[in-house]
Amino acid sequence: MENADESRITEEKVNPNVNCLEGKQCPKCGSYGPFEIIVLMRAMLYDDGIGDADEDTPEYDEDAPTTCYVCRFQGKLGAFDVR
């Protein structure tokens, strides 16, 4: 039986994403990213440009429109879940 460290190392060999893209893979080409994700973010827009952007992290969910950078496959982020 594998210990926790061996299990993690095995998983990283299969899917190297261990942070924001953990469990994500392009369903068309198999790429592990990067992926372009349309996010929501709040910013102040002035006539001469954008001022202070909201310091919160961008918001997105499994329904966010997503594009694979490698093959340009498009779908919802949830479609990129490793099955």
Image (cartoon, helix red, strand yellow):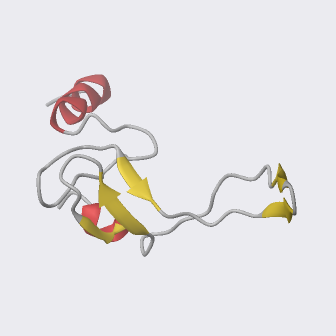
Residue 68: name its quadrant.
Answer: bottom left
Point 17% across, 61% down: residue? 83
Give x and y (percent) for residue 4. Answer: 30, 29
Give x and y (percent) for residue 34. Answer: 34, 43
Looking at the picture, tell me which residue is in the foreground, 57 or 74.
74
Give x and y (percent) for residue 3. Answer: 25, 27
Q: Residue furthest bottom?
A: 63
Give x and y (percent) for residue 62. Answer: 42, 70
- Relative height, residue 39 to residue 30 (above, below): below
| Lateral position of residue 61 relative to residue 40, left or right | left
Q: How many marks?
A: 0
Point 50% across, 69% down: residue? 61
Point 27% across, 61% down: residue? 81
Q: Quadrant of the N terminus?
A: top left
Looking at the picture, tell me which residue is in the foreground, 45 or 62.
45
| Lateral position of residue 54 relative to residue 19, left or right | right
